[in-house]
């Protein structure tokens, strides 16, 4: 199938692999877009009809709406194959759109490739057809905070600026409106490593990458999905691999591995660092955020006026500021956002205080390094209770264990293979409890906590043995804390 024109999806047979549960997520966003453009859409997911009832109902609502909205075109009723995948839905179709949560090594994806079927994602389709500048952000930690912070800054150019991608919003939700208005609306996309892996085909054909690419850091993560740490690193480099000389790459100078990627950058390189430097980029100088470009220096604002707390967030602030300056946002607009932006849900988020006990939701800390960052910010051997653990992703927990012992007076572990490894390293060194549900974990933490203490959910592991995903884990934490 020729993917150069959206019109070619008319009457094409397309399989959407992974419907998902998010109303604006990759699966639903893709299904809606394909139906609207006249594709014969097959939606398949290993979750069954009961688990996906709300998503299926929403797809069918949009099917009926599109039939009314577009009486002059054929809107095909989608076919649902739930609770299983079938080889024929991958081998006898024109395109497969793979949800980012679906492993590329899946036998069904491999079967489609063997038949020469195009494998796309909602993000790759967006890049194929939206030819205006796009800011893209990736990294192991900090990419969501950086993306949302940059999204707010881009509103200084246009209050309709769009933030999408791995923030549970498919960019296909916006594509048709943008193209209808020929609009160069500012856009920032958060890209996971899995999303990036779907992009080389589109980038190769377009002969360019994102206008501005930001790489926050790379730590071991998702090693259950990658053959090696090196393969995971290479997936992150896709964000700048296809850029042209007139495009921009923003890298973390304080991160040894990211700094070593500089020779492979194709665009114009800008750095961010917590230490003042003379190179192009965004730095801290005399307790102020400054941006340098070709010898010119701009002071953004003093650190004392920044609303977003936490030492680790300095990197997010600097990377977003650098990208915003490159995109043409004014110093005044950037400074205003930095004075107002207080943080992101699920990331070191204060839920409430109960009897002078603070409850912090850090469910997005799905890797050990993120827990270490949380310990640095909230750690207090006499006053911190940490809820953590879950399922291992082929990671190591030595540093996390050391941080837990040094920074927590008590640790509550969920069941799972990661918890088994953590327990082995911290047993006898810190008060240790277990919990088989979020309710039990929160109630146990409340019974241990005293006035002035902090309870933090910072797992450092996956959660699929107990929760739908990390966001479900965070919402259950919120709910149980509200119920105290």
Image (cartoon, rainbow, N blue to C red):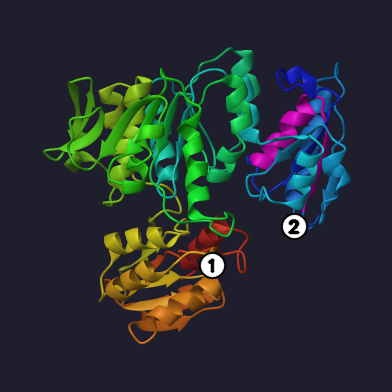
Q: Secondary structure at mark 2?
A: loop
Question: Which of the labelled discs sits on residue 51, or is there none?
Answer: 2
Residue depicted at 59% across the width and 13% down the height: 181
Residue depicted at 51% across the width and 16% down the height: 184
> Relative to 460, does residue 199 appear above or below in the rendering?
above
- Residue 256 in percent (x, y) is at 31, 47
Residue depicted at 74% across the width and 36% down the height: 31
Disc 1 marks which residue?
A: 392
Mark-to-mark CA distance, 1 and 2: 25 Å
- Residue 357 in percent (x, y) is at 33, 69
> Relative to 240, does residue 309 appear above or below in the rendering?
below
Where does the magenta region start and end?
26-45
Please tell me which of labels 1 and 2 falls first in the chain: 2
Q: Residues within 10 Å of mark 2 (few under 14, many from 20)?
A: some
What residue occupies the far left of the structure in this picture? Answer: 286
- Residue 153 in percent (x, y) is at 37, 29
Horizontally, residue 433 falls left or right of residue 384, namely right
């Amino acid at each position: 199938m020729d993917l150069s024109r959206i019109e070619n999806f008319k009457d094409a047979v397309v399989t959407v692999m992974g419907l998902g549960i998010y109303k604006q997520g990759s699966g639903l966003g893709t299904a809606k877009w394909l139906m609207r453009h006249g594709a014969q859409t097959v939606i398949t997911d290993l979750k069954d009809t009961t688990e996906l009832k709300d998503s299926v109902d929403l797809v069918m609502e949009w099917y009926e709406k599109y039939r009314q909205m577009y009486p002059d075109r054929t809107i095909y009723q989608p076919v649902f194959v739930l609770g299983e995948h079938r080889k024929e839905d991958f081998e006898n179709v024109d395109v497969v759109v793979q949800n980012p949560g679906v492993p590329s090594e899946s036998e069904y994806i491999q079967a489609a490739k063997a038949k020469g079927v195009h494998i796309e994602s909602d993000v790759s389709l967006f890049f194929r057809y939206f030819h205006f500048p796009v800011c893209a952000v990736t990294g192991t930690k900090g990419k969501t905070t950086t993306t949302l912070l940059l999204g707010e800054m881009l509103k200084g150019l246009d209050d309709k600026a769009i933030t999408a991608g791995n923030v549970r919003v498919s960019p296909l939700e916006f594509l048709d409106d943008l193209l209808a208005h020929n609009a160069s609306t500012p856009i920032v996309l958060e890209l996971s490593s899995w999303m990036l892996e779907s992009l080389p085909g589109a980038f190769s054909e377009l002969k360019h990458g994102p206008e501005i690419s930001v790489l926050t850091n790379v730590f071991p993560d998702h090693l259950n999905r990658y053959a090696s740490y090196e393969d995971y690193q290479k997936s992150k480099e896709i964000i700048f691999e296809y850029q042209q000389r007139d495009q921009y790459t923003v890298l973390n100078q304080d991160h040894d591995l990211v700094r070593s990627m500089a020779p492979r950058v194709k665009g114009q390189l800008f750095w961010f660092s917590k230490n003042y430097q003379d190179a192009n980029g965004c730095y801290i100088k005399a307790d102020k955020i400054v941006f340098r470009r070709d010898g010119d220096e701009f002071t953004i604002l003093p650190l004392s006026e920044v609303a977003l707390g936490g030492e680790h967030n300095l990197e997010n602030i600097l990377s977003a500021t650098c990208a915003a300056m490159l995109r043409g946002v004014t110093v005044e607009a950037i400074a205003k956002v930095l004075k107002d932006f207080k943080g992101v849900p699920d990331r070191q988020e204060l839920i409430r205080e109960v009897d002078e006990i603070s409850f912090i939701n850090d469910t997005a800390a799905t890797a050990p390094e993120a827990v270490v960052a949380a310990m640095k910010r909230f750690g207090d051997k006499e006053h911190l209770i940490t809820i953590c653990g879950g399922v291992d992703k082929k990671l190591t927990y030595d540093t996390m264990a050391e941080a837990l012992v040094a920074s927590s007076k008590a640790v509550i572990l969920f069941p799972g293979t990661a918890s088994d490894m953590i327990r082995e390293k911290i047993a006898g060194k810190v008060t240790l409890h277990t919990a088989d549900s979020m309710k039990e974990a929160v109630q146990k933490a409340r019974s241990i906590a005293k006035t002035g203490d902090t309870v933090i959910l910072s797992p450092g592991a996956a959660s699929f043995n107990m929760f739908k995903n990390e966001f479900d884990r965070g919402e259950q934490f919120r709910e149980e804390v509200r119920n105290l």
